[in-house]
Image (cartoon, rainbow, N blue to C red):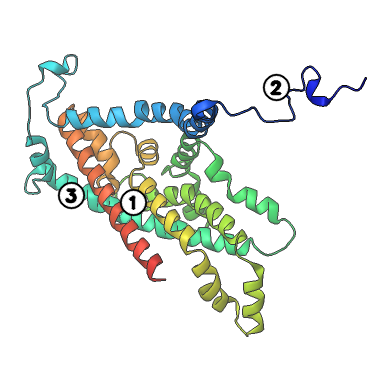
C-alpha cells in the first residue's frame, strides 16, 4: 500500500516541517511575537555594546566636569578641603576675579592666555608642516622607506614622561647635550645659555611639543595620501604639471577633509597640554612659558584656591567650545560651497 506524503507522521503542515514555514496564527499575533525579538535585538544591540564606554565616559569626564563647575561657585580653599559642604558660597566672584584684567589674578591669566595662543599656533603650524613634508617624501619608493617611517613615529610611540624627561636632561645648562653641541663643539654661543628658564624657555617648550606632535600629523597625513588615486597624479603629469603644481592642485585639495580634522585635534591637544610643561619645568613654569594649563594648576594646587582655579578651567572649557564651534561652522560652509 502506498502512503501519501500528507498522511505520513511528521509530514503534516502542523507538525513543524523544517522545510516549510510555520503557519500563521490567527489575528497576526504569531507574526508580532516572532518579529519583536529580532527587531529589539537589531535596535538594542548597538546601544548595549556602547553602554560600557558611555558609563566610563560619565565616570571619567562628565562627572568630574560637573564637580569642577560646582567648585567654581564656592570659596573652596585649604581650610575647607576636608569638608566641602562648609565652604561658603562665592557666587560669580571667582569668575569676576579671573576676568578682572586690572587685578593681578586677571592680568596673569591674560598673559598666560596669550602665551598659550602663541605656543599653540606655532606648534600646530610647525607640526603640520613637518608632518606634511615627511608624508609627501615617504610616498616615493626607495630602499629603507619602512625603517624611516617607523623611526619617525618613535616620538609618538614613546611615553610622554620618558620623552620629556629626556629632553629636560638634554636642555640642562651645564651638563646638557644641547649646550655641549652648540657651545663646545659648534661655538655658536659665547656662553652656555639657560634653556629651561628665562626667555629661552618658550623656544624650549615649542621644540619639545613639536617633537611630540609632528609624528601624529605625519601618521594621519600619510594615511590620507594613501587614499588619493594615483590616476590623478598621472593625468596631471600628462598635462605638464610639476611636483609643486601637483601638490597645490591635487594633494592639498584631496587632503582637505583630513586636514580639517587634524588641525582641530592638534589645536585642542596642544592648547590643553599639561604633561609637557609640567614635566619639563615642574610645578612653577617660567613667565615666558607660563601655559594656561600650568597656570590653572598653580592657581589651584599651589595657592590652594580651588574655587578660582575651577572658574579658570570653566572659562577655558567655554573658550575651547567656542573655538571648536566656529571652526566647524567655517569648515562646513566651505565644504558646502565646494
In this image, 213 relative to 78: left or right? right
Query: Could you say where residue 287 lies in the image, as x and y percent from the top left?
Result: 24, 46
Query: Could you say where residue 265 lies in the image, as x and y percent from the top left?
Result: 41, 50
Residue drawn at x 34%, y 65% as measured from the top left: 333
On the image, numbered disc 2 is attached to which residue? 16
SS for dot 2: loop
In this image, 144 relative to 218: left or right? right
Q: Decide if residue 35 is in sight here.
A: yes
Which residue, as the protein is rendered here, is positioned at the far top?
82
**In front: label 3 or label 2:** 2
Query: Could you say where residue 309 lies in the image, as x and y percent from the top left?
Result: 19, 34
Q: Quadrant of the N terminus?
A: top right
User: For the residue carrying disc 3, how many other residues have a C-alpha within 10 Å: few (<14), some (14-19), or many (20+)?
Assistant: some
Q: Which mark is residue 110?
A: 3
When the figure is inspected, residue 244 is found, relative to residue 302, above or below; the finding is: below
Q: Which badge, 2 or 1, is on the more N-terminal residue?
A: 2
Residue drawn at x 34%, y 48% as measured from the top left: 201
* Gap between marks 3 and 1 measured at Cα: 17 Å
Contact (Cβ within 8 Å) of mark 2 with mark 1:
no
SS for dot 1: helix
**Which of the 4 image quadrants contains residue 338?**
bottom left
- Between 200 and 309, the one lying in front of the other is 309
- Between 308 and 264, the one lying in front of the other is 264
For the image, the number of numbered tags is: 3
On the image, numbered disc 1 is attached to which residue? 202
Residue drawn at x 20%, y 43% as measured from the top left: 315
When the figure is inspected, residue 237 is found, relative to residue 318, above or below; the finding is: below
- Between 210 and 266, the one lying in front of the other is 266
Q: Decide if residue 195 is in sight here.
A: no
* Gap between marks 3 and 2 measured at Cα: 78 Å
Q: Which badge, 3 or 2, is on the more N-terminal residue?
A: 2
Amino acid at each position: 500500500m502506498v502512503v501519501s506524503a500528507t498522511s505520513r507522521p511528521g509530514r503534516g503542515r502542523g507538525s513543524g516541517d523544517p522545510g516549510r514555514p510555520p503557519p500563521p496564527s490567527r489575528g497576526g499575533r504569531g507574526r508580532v511575537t516572532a518579529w519583536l525579538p529580532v527587531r529589539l535585538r537589531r535596535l538594542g544591540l548597538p546601544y548595549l555594546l556602547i553602554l560600557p564606554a558611555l558609563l566610563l565616559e560619565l565616570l571619567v569626564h562628565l562627572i568630574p566636569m560637573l564637580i569642577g563647575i560646582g567648585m567654581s561657585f564656592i570659596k573652596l580653599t585649604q581650610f575647607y578641603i576636608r569638608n566641602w559642604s562648609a565652604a561658603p558660597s562665592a557666587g560669580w566672584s571667582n569668575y569676576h576675579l579671573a576676568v578682572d584684567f586690572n587685578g593681578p589674578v586677571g592680568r596673569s591669566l591674560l598673559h598666560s592666555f596669550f602665551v598659550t595662543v602663541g605656543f599653540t599656533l606655532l606648534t600646530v603650524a610647525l607640526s603640520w608642516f613637518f608632518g606634511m613634508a615627511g608624508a609627501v617624501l615617504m610616498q616615493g619608493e626607495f630602499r629603507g622607506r619602512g625603517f624611516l617611517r617607523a623611526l619617525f613615529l618613535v616620538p609618538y610611540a614613546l611615553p610622554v614622561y620618558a620623552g620629556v624627561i629626556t629632553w629636560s636632561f638634554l636642555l640642562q645648562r651645564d651638563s646638557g647635550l644641547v649646550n655641549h653641541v652648540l657651545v663646545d663643539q659648534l661655538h655658536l654661543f659665547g656662553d652656555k645659555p639657560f634653556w629651561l628658564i628665562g626667555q629661552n624657555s618658550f623656544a624650549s617648550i615649542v621644540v619639545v611639543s613639536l617633537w611630540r606632535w609632528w609624528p601624529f600629523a605625519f601618521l594621519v597625513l600619510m594615511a590620507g595620501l594613501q587614499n588619493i588615486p594615483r590616476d590623478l597624479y598621472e593625468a596631471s603629469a600628462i598635462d605638464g604639471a610639476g611636483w609643486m603644481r601637483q601638490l597645490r592642485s591635487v594633494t592639498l585639495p584631496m587632503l582637505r577633509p583630513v586636514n580639517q580634522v587634524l588641525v582641530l585635534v592638534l589645536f585642542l591637544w596642544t592648547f590643553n597640554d599639561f604633561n609637557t610643561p609640567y614635566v619639563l619645568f615642574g610645578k612653577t613654569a617660567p613667565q615666558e612659558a607660563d601655559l594656561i594649563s600650568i597656570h590653572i594648576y598653580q592657581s589651584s594646587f599651589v595657592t590652594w584656591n580651588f574655587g578660582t582655579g575651577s572658574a579658570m578651567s570653566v572659562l577655558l572649557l567655554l573658550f575651547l567650545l567656542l573655538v571648536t564651534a566656529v571652526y566647524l561652522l567655517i569648515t562646513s560652509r566651505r565644504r558646502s560651497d565646494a
